[in-house]
Image (cartoon, rainbow, N blue to C red):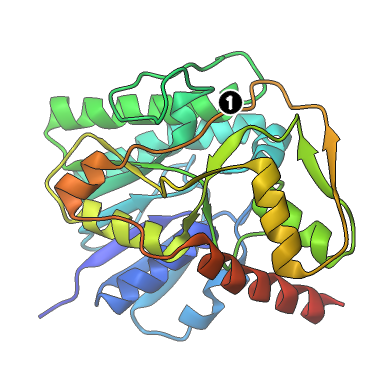
Amino acid sequence: MTKKTVLITGGAGFLGSHLSDRMITEGYRVIAMDNLITGNIKNIEHLMKLKDFEFYHHDVSKFIHVPGELHYILHFASPASPIDYLRIPIQTLKVGSLGTHNCLGLAKAKGARILVASTSEVYGDPLVHPQNEDYWGNVNPVGPRGVYDEAKRFQEAITMAYHTFHGLETRIVRIFNTYGPRMRLDDGRVLPAFIGQAIRGEDLTVFGDGTQTRSFCYVSDLIEGIYRLLLSDYAYPVNIGNPDEITINQFGEEILKLTGVQQKLIHKPLPKDDPKQRQPDITKARQLLGWEPKINRAEGLKITYEYFKNLLNQSS
């Protein structure tokens, strides 16, 4: 029996590389595509020697050609941290619009099922808590974060248009804060920032008063949810994340305790349009996919901390 082929865009990124691992494990032939603007080839080096793995160095905002049969597309190409999408705002908008259009066109041409990676950022700075899939969001389209938020909102809209107009098999995952090995220490998000500062012996920078909340999902839990959604028959958006909510101040204290350093939390002004609350309502994922997170934060943080420590030891 010939293996089914899956294309993973953003395949050298944090989530894309973990998805590549999972799809190989599940017996698929994997083509990872990445222009390496935020991805890292090291994330997939261990797969390069496998006969069922191929890497295409390509920007999905340009026309995509993949020869032969294609059964699934996982569209994960996009900068995902504020530090990246504020640095490359136009590329962020293009990968969410042109890149998604190209992936949908390819899926249509190949008769493939496509799953697109959306984000909790489509909810903006939410006025509903926790956030469920029926909430339309509170987004500033012309604010600094608008380039990411609106790229993802457009991505959802064009994906649904292909589903309703062309009958394409589509899946949409709304990803909440995720962490784990292969995150970049310098990606600007709170978890790598805190761990990096702790390891370097610096005080931990909290933006705002630290009462804003986040909910952190360990990467293996997220990948499991995405895999189940891909194989489900549900076309509308599904939240995948960990509903265990924590304030940024509490999270900073957890990191200080984990790393055993004597540093303290220092406060700086909150960036514009930074969400005050972030917690997924995962009722839909539980009912439709039988999914919920299994790894608690203490366990996940320990693994992630060891990863970052090794990373810094190797580079020093």
Q: Which residue appears at 57% of the width and 68% of the height?
A: 181
Residue 34: image location, x then y, percent: 52, 56
Residue 184: image location, x then y, percent: 67, 59
Q: Nearer the viewer, residue 118 or 195?
A: 195
Quadrant for the C terminus, please.
bottom right
Q: Which residue appears at 51% of the width and 51% of the height?
A: 216
Image-based side of 51 in relation to 255, left or right? left
Evaluate whether residue 111 shows in this view.
Answer: no
Q: Residue 36 occupies which quadrant of the picture?
A: bottom right
Residue 277: image location, x then y, percent: 54, 30
Number of marks in picture? 1
* Location of residue 228 with respect to 3 vertically, above or below: above
Image-based side of 150 in relation to 144, left or right? left
Q: Residue 53 occupies which quadrant of the picture?
A: bottom left
Q: Residue 70 occupies which quadrant of the picture?
A: bottom left
* Location of residue 294 with respect to 155 vertically, above or below: below
Crowd tier of the residue under label 1, counting other residues whose Cα lies within 10 Å: few below 14, some 14–19, many 20 or above: many
* Location of residue 61 with respect to 198 vertically, above or below: above
Three-letter residue code for mark 1: Val
The residue labelled by disc 1 is: 147
Q: Nearer the viewer, residue 71 or 262?
A: 262
* Location of residue 42 with respect to 249 vertically, above or below: below
Evaluate whether residue 198 shows in this view.
Answer: yes
Q: Secondary structure at mark 1?
A: helix
Q: Which residue appears at 36% of the width and 58% of the height?
A: 293
Image-based side of 37 in relation to 131, left or right? right
